[in-house]
Image (tube, coloured by chain):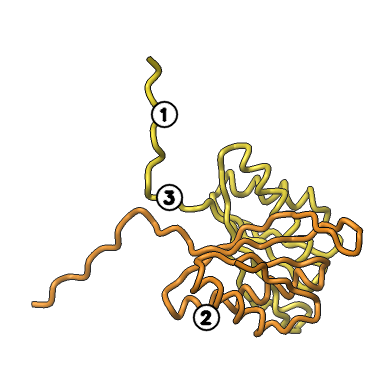
Chain colours: A orange, B yellow
Amino acid sequence: MDMIKVSANSRTSAVAGAIAGVIREHKRAEVQAIGAGAVNQAVKALVLASSYLRNDGIYVVCMPEFVDVEIEDKVRTAIKLVVEPRVPDPTPPVAPPATP
Amino acid sequence: MDMIKVSANSRTSAVAGAIAGVIREHKRAEVQAIGAGAVNQAVKALVLASSYLRNDGIYVVCMPEFVDVEIEDKVRTAIKLVVEPRVPDPTPPVAPPATP
C-alpha cells in the first residue's frame, strides 16, 4: 500500500479521491504531510474523503502520528494520518420491526 | 463541554493538555481551528494528547469536519476535529495462559 503524500499545493479533491480509493481497496490509508500548508490540505482532503465514503456506508476515523522522514539528507518531522474504517460498535443494531 | 479553540500561535503542549483533560472528563473533545497554521497546531497537539492518553490506556481517534463559524460578521470555514476514544474491538483479547 502506497503512502499518499500531500503538499500545500495538492488539490483537495484529488487527494480525497486517492484516500477514498485506497480505503475501499485496502481498508487503510496513510497520508503524509510536511508543513502547515500540507497538513491543512491533508485534513481538508480527509473531510471530503470521509463524506465520499459515508455515501458507501464506510465511516472512517483518523489517528495522526509524527514520523521522521529524510528529504535531501535532512531529517524532517512529518505528520502521518492513518485512516481506517471505524471499528463497528459491538452493540448490534436494533432490527427494524417486522412488517405486518 | 467547551470547544477547544486553537490558533496558529497556540502552544502545542497546552492544547494537548486541554484535549487530554477534556477526553478524560467527558470522553469526547472538539477542537476548532481556522487556517492552515491553526489546523497544523491542532493536529500536532492531537498527536501529543494521544500519547498522553495512551499512557492511561485510552486510545483516541479523530474525525475531522468542516463547520461554518461567524467571526466579526463574516462566515469562515473552520476545521473541527472531533476526538473520541476508539470503540473497543468487538473481539475480546486472548487471555494469557494460566501460570502452572
On the image, the x and y values in percent for residue A63 come to 62, 58
Tell me the distance, in whole angstroms, between the alpha carbons under discs 1 and 3: 18 Å
Q: Residues within 10 Å of mark 2 (few under 14, many from 20)?
A: some
Subunit under mark 3: B
Rendering quarter of residue B21: top right
> Is residue B24 or residue A49 the one in the foreground?
A49
Tell me the distance, in whole angstroms, between the alpha carbons under discs 1 and 2: 41 Å
**Residue at mark 3:** B89
Q: Are marks 1 and 3 in contact (CB under 8 Å)?
A: no
Q: Residues within 10 Å of mark 1 (few under 14, many from 20)?
A: few
**Residue at mark 2:** A52
Q: Amino acid at mark 2?
A: Tyr
SS assignment at label 1: loop
SS assignment at label 2: helix
Rendering quarter of residue A50: bottom right
Rendering quarter of residue A16: bottom right
Disc on the earlier residue, 1 or 3: 3
Do the residues at pointers 1 and 3 share their chain? yes
Name the residue furthest right: A73
On the image, the x and y values in percent for residue B43 come to 72, 60
On the image, the x and y values in percent for residue A58 come to 45, 71
A98 vs B60: above or below? below
Q: Residue at x 56, y 47 (%)?
A: B59
Subunit under mark 2: A
Q: Are marks 1 and 2 in contact (CB under 8 Å)?
A: no
**Residue at mark 1:** B96
The image quadrant where one finds the C terminus of chain A is bottom left
> Is residue A36 or residue B8 the one in the foreground?
A36
Do the residues at pointers 2 and 3 share their chain? no
Name the residue furthest top: B100
